[in-house]
Amino acid sequence: MAAHLPGALVDAAYDAVGRPVLFRLGGGDPEVAHETTLDWLAWWGRTPARRAILELAFGSQGRPVDVAGIRFAGPVGLAAGMDKDARALMAWARLGFSHVEFGTVTGRPQPGNPQPRMYRLKDSHGVINRMGFNNAGSAAIAARLELAGIRRGNLAAGMPVGVSIGKTKVVPLADAVEDYLSSLRRLVHLVDYLAVNVSSPNTPGLRSLQGAEELSGLVRSLVAEAAVQAEESAQSALGPVPVFVKIAPDLEWSAIDEALEVCEAAGAAGVIATNTTLTRDGLAPQDRPTGAQAGGLSGAPLTARALDVVSYVTRHTSLPVIGVGGIMTADDARAMLQAGAALVQLFTGFIYRGPGLVRDINALSGLTERD
Ligand SMILES: Cc1cc2nc3c(=O)[nH]c(=O)nc-3n(C[C@H](O)[C@H](O)[C@H](O)COP(=O)(O)O)c2cc1C
């Protein structure tokens, strides 16, 4: 069995050095910390020797889970938005993640919203962002995955990979389906699952695609195209790529009911709940956001609402559910899994807790350290 660094040491190092340094970079600009982390992880992921060192330091693995025909080595994945352009694609599995959701990518490359567009709410352990799908576009991401030798089913990244697809900002809502389809066609042979993002608050009108009629048209088109692509592909034995739908935490229960009905009828493989919230509940007084901080809120202020939504969704659908939102501790992950989530994902918790959180979640799922 490989000797990993003691967990307490990883936590202490992140608390004492990792987080303080990252939080000071760029004069405290969270986007600089984010970019630096990705550069750093991309570097560490580049050669087998470096990957082995990462694995030795941080590797952990939980209990394997099968979801939508895919075997995941453990319960915890990296949520969409952290590695939008699949830059650190070879590193994440070595930190103990069982999957990563790249993107959100759009049909065309786009710069996203003007900076600043990401804020830390330190006392609340939250983040507000209005990135606006800054990404290199689905063609460039597909080229990057191909270059790295990543194909559907080959686990070349050391784990299954998903990609989140969204709408290009300048494409009118009426043409949204074609924009999503263009990304699907480029990526479908490279990834293990697709996540349809209709729940980001930062692309005008995007969330209206969660309405029953719009969602039905979109998901049916994507599922049908995935089937066509599977038939035409050398990978046809794998069947069509599973299509997950990611929903917002701000939907009324009745709207969730409708969305679930649509997902089931349209052939979606599962539901990802939730994206960031537009509400501002649960913030520490020092963090009361200024008007300038428009965008989606994530992290601890979202924990309770995301868990409520996941509990509701698992009780109202037979589709598998990936729980995400405000998982800041292993207990938060446990609550999501006990509420019926098949897998969980992290974003903001990883910023505040570092790789130790991944290890803790793996441990609670029935730890067997990677040999
Ligand atoms: C800076 C930032 C960027 C994000 N970008 C995306 C994205 O591109 N696509 C997406 O589906 N979710 C995106 N999210 C939402 C996360 O994937 C996740 O659903 C949300 O943050 C709740 O989880 P958390 O509380 O663990 O952060 C983003 C979140 C943050 C903080």
Image (cartoon, rainbow, N blue to C red):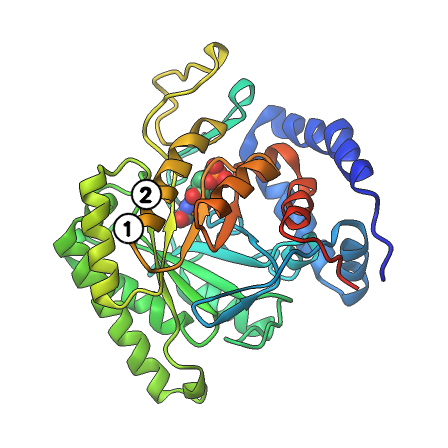
From the viewer's perspective, is residue 191 above or below residue 53? below
Residue 75 in the image, given as x and y percentages of width and height = 57, 54
Count the numbered circles shown.
2
Residue 282 in the image, given as x and y percentages of width and height = 42, 20
Residue 342 in the image, given as x and y percentages of width and height = 47, 55
Along the viewing direction, whichever of 207 and 145 lies nearer the viewer: 207
Determine which of the numbered discs, if any, sits on residue 89 in the image.
none
The quarter of the image that holds ligand 1 is top left
Q: In the image, 249: left or right of 51?
A: left
Residue visible at 25% across and 62% down in the picture: 264
Whether disc 2's CB lies below 8 Å from ligand 1 is answered: no
Q: Are marks 2 and 1 in contact (CB under 8 Å)?
A: yes
Residue visible at 36% across and 82% down in the picture: 230
Q: In the image, 212: left or right of 363?
A: left
Quadrant of the rendered image containing residue 148: bottom right
Quadrant of the rendered image containing residue 60: bottom right
Whether disc 1's CB lies below 8 Å from ligand 1 is answered: no
Q: Is residue 117 visible?
A: no
The residue under label 1 is 316
- The three-letter code of the residue at mark 2 reads Tyr
Q: Secondary structure at mark 2?
A: helix
Determine which of the numbered discs, if any, sits on residue 312 in the image.
2
From the viewer's perspective, is residue 146 above or below residue 100? below
Residue 95 in the image, given as x and y percentages of width and height = 68, 52
Is the residue marked by circle 2 packed among few (<14), some (14-19), or many (20+) residues within 10 Å? some
- The three-letter code of the residue at mark 1 reads His
